[in-house]
Amino acid sequence: MKILLPISMKKERILRRNKEIEKMTKKIAAENKKIRLSFPMILLLGIILGSLFGIFFPEKSKVLKPLGDIFLNLMFTAVVPMVFVSIATAVGNMANMSRLRKILLSTLFTFIGTGLIASVYVFIAVKLFPPAVGTKIALQSTAIEEAKSAADLLVSSFTVPDFVNLLSRRNMLPLIIFATLFGFCVSHCGGQESPVGKILNHLNDIMMKLINVIMWYAPIGLGAYFASLIGEFGPNLIGDYGRTLLIYYPLCVLYFFTAFPCYAFLAGGREGLRQMFRYIYSPAITAFATQSSMATLPVNMETCKKIGVPKDISDLVLPMGATMHMDGSVLSSIVKISFLFGIFQTPFTGIETYFLSVVVSILAAFVLSGAPGGGLVGEMLIVSLFGFPPEAFPLIATIGFLVDPPATALNASGDTIASMLVARIVEGKDWLHTYLSKN
């Protein structure tokens, strides 16, 4: 004989069961959140262990290099299609072309503005602590390639002679321009509702998923890469360039923990500051280890998503920033210039010298980084514009290599901050508060 329960008791059981399910769901979500938040620490732990292995076992660390190369190759392989798809999708989905124009102009303004502020930081540092004091380096005659003319440099920076060349990560600026034009045409041919627009949106989701899969290998790959790097080049860090590194590395830390918080506060107030300190470490650590803004681009996109930057803004700002926004490179360029002035016993003074230093540094970071071999071209530009002998070139090329990890960390994590600033300009002062209130 069945016992019929009152309807009220049935409802009570259902409600109790629903509460248990809700409680379990929240617990699982909290655990997942804890795992996500701990990923930067896992990444950092992998790098630290790899570094220690490279210090204590320099010869054996070379065996680990293939593991690091596999990770970098996976990231570099994914980054070109990801840049094209993300930019083409963002522009193609944008029905309001005035918004696109506002985003692009705000991006350029932000890139130049933060570059100028970085220049002020480094000028103060090199005046207080001249990098070449007590440094004695025997100069060796070195043949360097002849610098391209301004016209040739402009053409090679922004265009390529063949479509196939767009598929190389060494030609990111031409790819960005092509993707923007392609997206513009998609927008005028039906936008995201068109067949091509739908394909682009699906491809964009697939690329983001692919990057997430690759990133699970990051702690092992970056740890192995750093072990081989420290094992091979560790002694150079305390050689003739020790003073320069002792100036540059703390300067990068100072800029990271003073300028970036100011930018984040300007972008989103206290909420912007909290979001920055909560999520900025993943791109910074990845960039420090890989020494590549392009390899860090997928991590930056995920970071901006977590912070709350609108997708159409981050999809445009981040790929552009990976090739054009280089605060760390601005810092290193002026340190290199000051170093050469000290080596050749020339006073690093005068408005004209300072102005030319800023122009060269921002030009090298803003334009030349997108050209093939842009870093070396920027160093050639320093040597030629300031009238240094060719023997100066290998000196600053060596410095460029040694300061690359922190410079890239600033370059890449600075792109995330730039995206927040652009969101503030485009969306208004309450953009982040609106996002957080909905999530």
Image (tube, rainbow, N blue to C red):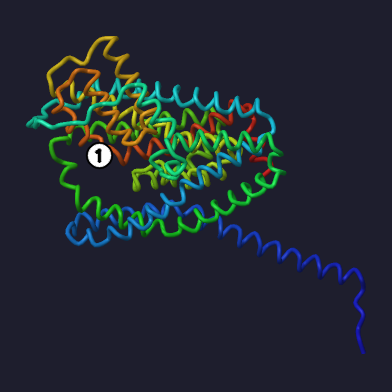
- The relative height of residue 182 versus residue 115 in the rendered view (above or below) is below
Indicate the amino acid at tag 1: Phe
- In the image, what residue occupies the spot 41% across and 55% down? 74
Split into 4 quadrants, where in the image is the C terminus?
top right
**Residue 18 x %, y %:** 76, 65
- The relative height of residue 45 versus residue 342 in the rendered view (above or below) is below
Left or right: 307 as drawn, with respect to 19 = left
Left or right: 185 as drawn, with respect to 287 = right
**Residue 325 x %, y %:** 43, 31
Label 1, on which residue?
A: 401
**As drawn, which residue projects farthest toward the front?**
162
- The relative height of residue 29 versus residue 237 in the rendered view (above or below) is below
Q: What element carries label 1?
A: helix
**As drawn, which residue projects farthest toward the bottom?**
1
- Residue 360, quarter of the rendered image: top left
Q: Say which of 99 and 264 sits in front.
A: 99
Q: Say which of 315 and 428 sits in front.
A: 315
- The relative height of residue 276 versus residue 269 in the rendered view (above or below) is below
**Residue 359 x %, y %:** 35, 19
Left or right: 120 as drawn, with respect to 172 = left
- In the image, what residue occupies the spot 45% across and 41% down? 166
